[in-house]
Every structure is written in structure tokens, then in C-alpha cells.
Amino acid sequence: MKKKLTLVLVATTAYTINVFMLNNIKKLSKHYNLLIFCNNALSLKKLLPKNIVLNDINFKRQPSPIIDLITFLKLLSLLIKNKPDLTISISPKAGLITALSSFISRVPYRIHWFTGQVWVTKKGFIRNFYKILDRIIFNLCHHVLVDSHSQRKFLLLNNIISKNRSTVLLKGSVGGVNIKKFKYKITNRKYLRKKLKISKDIFTFLYLGRINKDKGIIELIEAFTRVERIYKAVRLVLVGPMEDFYINELIKNYKKVLYAGETSTPQKWFSLGDIFCLPSHREGFGVVVIEAGSCNLATLGSNIYGINDAIVEDETGFLHKVGSISDIKKKMLFVIKNKKMLKKFGQKSRLRVEKNFDENLISEKLLEFIQSIIKN
């Protein structure tokens, strides 16, 4: 019997694995010995097949030279000990540390998954520094995956990657969407609207994700407050981890901007809104857009790489100028006046997700990709 090859998947956080990689992992674990290294890895134990080995590695999201060095040495030790045939890294910090340790320990095949660039919104030395780090990751890997076609084009234009050593799976995304789980339910809509005291005739804009400046939340709130001066029967609901003190204080000034806190069941919240909003300044793909689409919800998002892969303009949603309060306001006013169009866009969104972003399609394609890499 042929011995199974060993794959190591490295991510900065268990959250990344949980949100993006669960179905991929289940698929790969049937064909390979699979090890997962990330922060708080043991929290994944109940979510994954029993044959998967989990190891905690203390990655820090922000730069921390001493901790990063300790993390690098621990990962290097684990790679030398386990002798994997292939490593896959996802997220910038994990990508750099994995690329270096995999190269030194001579892992035969090394893959990194680009899911957005931290340097897009930076300037000067910092921007160039992070670009160099991404080039190092690419040069130390045999191949890279990119989670959107527009992001791949952007990376090629900036000479970060090459055409022959970079791939996008199907139409994009890392793990696709569980279309059975992410589905519109009228019961969720009624329950959540009752909970937040939003009557059925109130037009509701929904944001779900990390709440910080880079996600464009400040512009979204400002645009909404200008809309609210014209249309009184509107609400803006924000769902997700609060990462910005200023935004937390800002929303206290507006009664019609509702912060609902974090959630472990995002699929329920998409049924609440009349349109989803993603005014982000940078985004690798915008998986939350296709999750919303799977729940029959159209999206209003920034016209940036990643998001403009997830939204088909004037078919499944609308695009606005990034960071433009006036353009966000203009599009908000338009969608309020065109509820029937929104319903059609929501239906088209669901059909597009079923056709292109079903998690099982993505997982099958990832398996094919890995098998082709190892053969070559």
C-alpha cells in the first residue's frame, strides 16, 4: 500500500482555519496525513476529523521581533521533526515565517496563499518594506495561490509574483461557501428584526466583519447619517468584533446605527438586511460578499481588487469609489428607491454562488492543484 504524503497547513489564527479552510481540510485529510499549526489550534479539535494533528504556535498579528523569532524556531523544529512533503501557508505573518522555515528545513514543496496585501494602503518606506516581504515569500515558495483574479493581476503588475508560478482556483476565494448553511431564512429575518426593534418596513443596511478603519466603517457611517436625514425609515446594523475605539464611540452618537456585537452564526444575520455593505479599503477577495449572496443578499462594495471579483456590477450588486462618502451616499439612496431590483440581484447572487463558489467545487479544485504540484 502506498504511503500517504504529509501536508502541513500553517495559519496565523485558528479563526482563519475555521472560517476559510474547514471543508478544504476535510477533503485533503482523506488523501494526505494532515498537520495544522496555528495560534489556539486545539480549539479546532471538535470541528475536524480525528486523524488531523494540531499544534499550537503563538503567532502574533502585529510585528513582535522576539516573539516572531521564537515562533520561527518552533515552526522550524516542528518541520524538521515531522518532515512534511508540502507546506501551505495562509495570511502574511504565517506566510513569511513558514516560507523561511520550510526553505531552511528543505520541505520538498512549498505553497503560500495570498489573501490580500497589508501594504496596499501604506506609503513610503513601510509600503516598500512589506512589498519586499511578499517578494521573499514568493521567491521561497515553489508556487503561490491567490484568492482572486484581480488580486493576481495586481500582484503581477507590482512584480511580486510571476504568471507561471501563481494560480487562482476557479473564480476565486479560499474555501468558497457552504450553500446549505448560508441560505436565506424568513424566520431569521423576523427574529433578528424583532430583537433589534426593526420593523419590517424599515430599510436596513448590513455590515458583517471586523470593525476597523481599514474596512471603511467610518465612511459608511457618515454616508448613512446623510441618507438618514432624507429617509427616516432606515437602519445601519454592524456585526462583528470591534477593533477601533474611535468607531465604538462614534456609533454611540447615532440611534439608527446599531452595533449587534460579535457572532458565531453569520449565516443568520444575512437574512436581516436589505443590502450588504463592504466599503473596505483593501480586500483579498471578499468572501463575505459571496456568503451574503448565498443568502439572496445583494452587496454595495468598494470598487477595489478582490471585491470587484465577488460582485458583478449591476447584476449582483453595486460598486462605489473607495473611501468616497458622497458616492456611498449616492448608491445608498439609489438602492432604497429600487427594492425590486435588489430582490432580483439577490436571486442572481444566489445562483452565481451555487454555480461558482460552492465549497465542494473549491475543495475538489484545491486537491487537483496539490496533486499536480506534487507530480511535477
Image: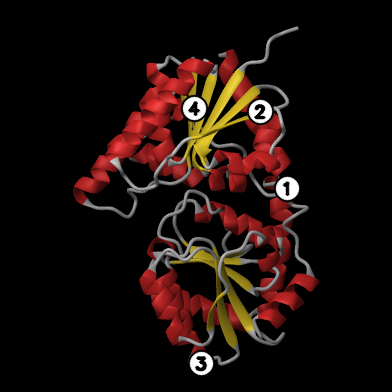
How far apart in space, not on screen, are marks 1 and 2 (Cα)? 19 Å
Q: How many marks?
A: 4
Q: Dot 2, crowdedness within 10 Å: few (<14), some or many (≥20)?
A: some
How far apart in space, not on screen, are marks 1 and 4 (Cα)? 27 Å
- Type of amino acid under label 4: Ile
Mark 2 in CB contact with mark 3 (< 8 angstroms): no
Mark 1 in CB contact with mark 4 (< 8 angstroms): no
Left or right position of 357 against 155:
right
- Secondary structure at badge 1 equals helix
Q: Residue at x 67, y 79 (%)?
A: 339
Question: Which residue is denoted by mark 3 in the rendering?
Answer: 230
Question: Which residue is denoted by mark 2 in the rendering?
Answer: 367
Q: Earlier in the sequence, mark 1 or mark 2?
A: 1
Which quadrant of the structure image shows residue 154?
top left
Which one is in front, 72 or 216?
72
- Type of amino acid under label 2: Leu
Question: Which residue is denoted by mark 4 in the rendering?
Answer: 111
Q: Earlier in the sequence, mark 2 or mark 3?
A: 3
Which one is in front, 218 or 277?
218
Q: Nearer the viewer, mark 1 or mark 4?
A: 4
Residue 355: which disc? 1
